[in-house]
Amino acid sequence: MTPGQRAEARIAELGITEPRDLDVDLIAMDAGMEVVYENLQGCEATLVGVGNKAIATVRRSTVRGRERFSVGHELGHWDMHRGRAFRCRVDDPDQNWASDTLLEKEADTYASHLLMPTSMFNPRVKALGTPGFREVEDLSEVFATSVLATCMRVADINTLPVILACYNARGVLRWRKAAADVPPRWWLRQQLDDDSFAYELLHNGKSHPSPGKQPAEVWFENMDADQYEMLECCMPSRAGEIMVLLYLGPKMLDARYDPHVGNRKFNQHGPRVARK
Ligand SMILES: [Zn+2]
């Protein structure tokens, strides 16, 4: 079983069918893991297990969704990686999703499925059409999850041609997460374009939470991007960062492999760094 399947099997075993019944502290207790909340320094959560009992210590947060994700993450370790102790940084894509630490990724996936099980999450996403940040926020209230974790899950379920990206306060790409079916030929710009809504948000504070049309060249380096249309919405995130949800237009899904982008070492602007 994959980490996601394990988490969803636990939910199914408990007979939970509604998001409001996804009480992570109770689910953890049922699995022999007690949860305590403390003002932890230097990490988001820790796990110590002895025999069939474990204690997860989770950093207090004003965002309940973050705490819940931490509990789900530690329960993932307890369920899948028993016999080891953990100190974790949870729910930070830069630290976990982008790292090579397999166990951390597994625990994140587990938490994501535990809090937003496919059977409850997918129909609600489908009903939203092309969700902007307002709709994602509503969804995050239903599941008591953070907006970030909810966006990640929307990309994960791979039912929409979506890319979630985070740009720092200087407008430089920090990380991206695309739905699996987004063609890899689409090469996201490393620096925010002046014509993007995200640029306007960063420099003029003008928010754009609902998806609006954009020429694809605003977001992608591909030479032929000016022939395509897409949707963009954005919102401010922590530490002056900008979160972006991009939806590829239908024609962009059929575009062929582009040999002119991605692996170039040089172009007219000089040396370029290939994507990691
Ligand atoms: Zn961990």
Image (cartoon, grey):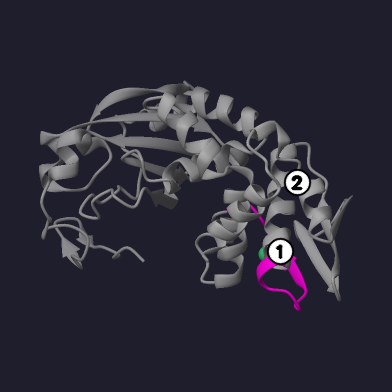
Where does residue 187 sit, x and y in percent of width and height? Answer: 25, 51
Magenta stretch: residue 161 in it? Answer: no
72 vs 263, nearest the viewer: 72
Tag 1 residue: 88
Give the residue drawn at x 71%, y 63%. 88
**Disc ID at residue 150:** none
Q: Quadrant of ligand 1?
A: bottom right
Asked if residue 270 lies left or right of residue 167, the reply is: left
22 vs 226, nearest the viewer: 22
Q: Secondary structure at mark 1?
A: strand
102 vs 165, nearest the viewer: 102
Tag 2 residue: 24
Asked if residue 112 lies left or right of residue 231, the reply is: right
Asked if residue 117 lies left or right of residue 160, the reply is: right
- Main secondary structure of the magenta stretch: loop
Give the residue drawn at x 37%, y 27%. 130
